[in-house]
Amino acid sequence: MNRRLLATGVAILAGLTSIPAASATYTAVVSQIQPNHETLDCIFFRLSGVTAISPASPGDWFAIPRDSAGAMETFAVLLTSRTKGNIAVTVHTSNATACGYAQAIAVIM
């Protein structure tokens, strides 16, 4: 009985810690990329047909800070989706923002 209770508790905690607070998920093809900005150090992108993202973001743009772990690898995934035109990516956000836009915390192809 104690072993079952412990296993259930661990499973619940693992589920809670792996999901960011107020997270959202979007899947679509990358429609635009802005890899540079004169004053903001982020990579910006939009997803085709995705509007009203969370957190609210001007023009429905996502942002990834350049100094975040894996930023250049993520840019490569975004660029592949954009240039191939038919490869969708899945983007996960949290309630955080980066450079004033919805922060993408994970991009998966």
Image (cartoon, helix red, strand yellow):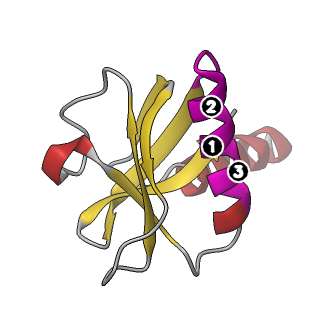
In the image, which disc is placed on residue 99? none
| Secondary structure of residue under mark 1 | helix
Residues at discs 2 and 3 in contact (Cβ within 8 Å): no
* Secondary structure mostly seen in the magenta stretch: helix
Report the mark closest to the observer, 2 or 3: 2
Q: Which residues are magenta?
A: 73-88
In the image, what residue occupies the spot 58% across and 81% down? 67
| Magenta span contains residue 82 | yes
In the image, which disc is placed on residue 83? 2
The residue under label 2 is which amino acid type?
Thr
Name the residue carrying label 1. Answer: 79
Q: Is residue 8 above or below residue 88?
A: below
**Residue ranking furthest to the right:** 3
Q: Earlier in the sequence, mark 2 or mark 3?
A: 3
Q: Quadrant of residue 15?
A: top right
In the image, which disc is placed on residue 76? 3
In the image, what residue occupies the spot 69% across and 65% down? 72
Question: How far across and down, in percent of the image, does residue 21 sit?
Answer: 38, 55
In the image, what residue occupies the spot 51% across and 24% down? 29
Q: CA distance from mark 1 to mark 2?
A: 6 Å
Is residue 45 rendered to the left or right of residue 91?
left
Q: Is residue 91 above or below residue 103?
A: above
The residue under label 1 is which amino acid type?
Leu
Question: How far across and down, in percent of the image, does residue 51 sit?
Answer: 22, 30
- Quadrant location, the N terminus: top right
Q: CA distance from mark 1 to mark 3?
A: 5 Å
| Magenta span contains residue 70 | no
Question: How far across and down, in percent of the image, does residue 66 sit?
Answer: 55, 75
